[in-house]
Image (spheres, helix red, strand yellow):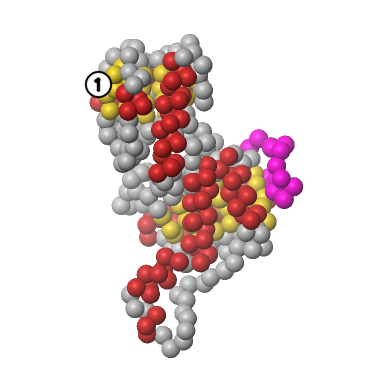
Amino acid sequence: MKIVLLDGYALNHDLDWQQLDQLGELDHYDRTAVNNNEEILQRIGQAEIVLTHKTPLNDRVISQAPRLRYIGIMGTGYDVVDIQSADRNHVAVTNVPTYATDAVAQFTFALLLEVASQVGLHNRLVHEDKWLCVPNFTFWERPLFELQGKTLGLIGYGHIAKKVAELGHAFAMKVIFYNHRPKKDHPSWAGQVDLDELLTRSDVISLHTIQTPDTVNLIDRSSLKKMKKSAILLNTARGKLVNETDLAKALNRGDIYAFATDVVGTEPISADNPLLKAKNCYITPHIAWAPFETRKRLLDITVSNLTNYLAGKPSNLVHFYK
């Protein structure tokens, strides 16, 4: 059986692909051009199994791959695969839905704490000898504030958001959330509200919803106007949830206080991304998922998904055809 892994580089700085080698004949590519259907099809060839991290598999690719029967997405989001095409072409699709829950929740709070406590800035200033030159025992260059008592609003309430809610509660924050499908089971300390109420009440707004046609540009000029001028917006979900032009303008006008994100609409970030020149904007290069333990878990579940599919007991299905 032929297995093709289209883009293993980001995952495999320090992991071993031997588990996949044992399941079939593995062709492993570090990178595949994301906008080159011909290259993608050439690499898939006669393979029955394709594993992808960020390389998109659109209808043209899926419909023209003659023996393709299984797509394993090495991640949670499945927007990289045309699920309707997989349906039409009888291709099973799996993902890895919960591998990064703890890591992404941890990173969400790392972003928030950076805005609140400015550790990175003041570490740099101390190493630049700024502390040597002040007359007092202390100094700070930007406002610092406590999280206790602030309202944390979560847009989306899946596994990661629930973990972020627990962290917020531990910091004595007031937690509210909005989910497009109301949730019946949630802690008494987490209040379920509609989106407008969340936008207007929250001191911190954190995005944890998937990218769909309905959620692209969820945060735009209209929603930004509803937020407090002191609001902090966090994004560890998908870059396209945010209209970056509208957000940059809002930051530069002081309509909201800060934006901290691990994702942008086009990755790697483009030189003309307006957020690069926006005030009080913190950007990291999509690393919330990248701790060693997290990536090892991702690989293990990817292998488990494929093993279970081959055994006729598929797991973590996005879509399935026998």
Q: Where is residue 28 in the image (x, y as percent from the top left)?
A: 28, 28
Viewed as shown, does residue 59 lie left or right of 214? left
Q: Main secondary structure of the magenta part?
A: loop
| 188 part of magenta stretch | yes
Regarding mark 1 in the picture, which secondary structure is present there? helix
Where is 313 relative to 11, above or below? above
The residue at which mark 1 appears reads as: 42
The magenta segment: 180-196
Percent of width and height locating residue 147: 60, 63
Horizontal side of 255 relative to 5 (left or right) equals right
Residue 35, can we see it? no
For the residue marked with disc 1, what is the amino acid? Gln
Q: Which residue is drawn at 51% across and 23% down?
A: 315
Q: Residue 180, position in %: x, y?
A: 63, 37
Q: In which quarter of the image is residue 53?
A: top left
User: Residue 256's image quarter?
Assistant: bottom right
Up-down relation of residue 190 to residue 4 (above or below): below
Residue 23 showing in the rendered view = yes
Q: Is residue 189 magenta?
A: yes
Residue lying at 62% horizontally and 49% vertically, measured from the top left:
165
The residue most toward the right is 188
Residue 11 point in image, percent of width and height? 35, 38
